[in-house]
Amino acid sequence: MPEPQATFSAGGVVLNAQGQILVVNQKHNSWSLPKGHIDLGETAVEAAKREIYEESGLCNLVMIRELGTYQRFKIGKGGVGEDQSEWKTITFFLFQASEQNLAPVDPENPEARWVDKEEVATLLTHLKDKEFFLKIKETL
C-alpha cells in the first residue's frame, strides 16, 4: 500500500448569536465542521475563513482563538469509513458570526445548518471529528 499523502487543512467552529454551531454537509453523505485544504500562500486562519465562506456563505467572521490541531484520514467514499490515501492535519479556530443566513457557495457542500452545541457531536460523521469536538466543547 502506498504512503498516504500528507495534507494540511484548516477550519472553524463557528458560533452564531444564539450560541449555535455551524455544521456542513459534504456531497450529500457526510457532516463535518467547515474546513478544507490550506492553499499555497494562505495562512491557516485565511484558509479557515475561505472554507467557511465556501461551505456556508458566511463572511463576517471574528476569529476568537485557535482551538487545536488533530490528525485523521480523509473520510471514505460515500461518507463511509476512511480513505487511507490522504492523512490530514487539521487546525481549528473559534469564530463568531454576526450573520444568520446560510447559503453554501461550493456545490460539493450543498447544505449548512446551525446546530445546538449539545447536538453537534451526534451529527458529525467522522469519529475523529466527534472526538475533537467533544474535547473542546466545554471551552466554547
Image (cartoon, grey):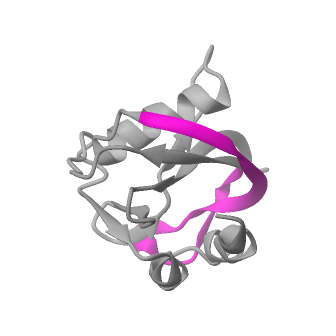
Residue at x 72%, y 66% (from the top left corner): 139
Pinpoint residue 89: horizontal percent, then vertical percent.
74, 48
Q: Which image quarter is the N terminus in?
A: bottom right
Query: Does the stretch in magenta take in 123?
Result: no
The residue range painted magenta reads: 61-89
- Between 25 and 94, the residue placed more toward the observer is 94
Q: Is residue 91 left or right of residue 23?
A: right
Q: Of 90 and 72, which appears nearest the observer?
A: 90
Q: Quadrant of the C terminus?
A: bottom right
Residue 137 is situated, as x and y percent measured from the top left of the image, at 66, 72
The x, y position of residue 36, in whole percent, is 52, 43
Q: Residue at x 51, y 83 (%)?
A: 118
Residue depicted at 34% across the width and 66% down the height: 114
The majority secondary structure of the magenta stretch comes to strand
| Residue 19 seen by the camera | yes
Residue 132 shows in this picture: no
Q: Nearer the viewer, residue 132 or 99?
A: 99
The answer to if 81 sits in the magenta stretch is yes
Residue 25 image offset from top left, x and y in percent: 34, 63
Q: Nearer the viewer, residue 48 or 40?
A: 48
- Number of numbered tags placed on the structure image: 0
Residue 42's place in the image compared with 87, above or below, is above
- State the residue lying farthest toward the top: 41
Judge whether 129 appears above or below 80 on screen. above
Is residue 30 found left or right of 56 in the rendered image? right
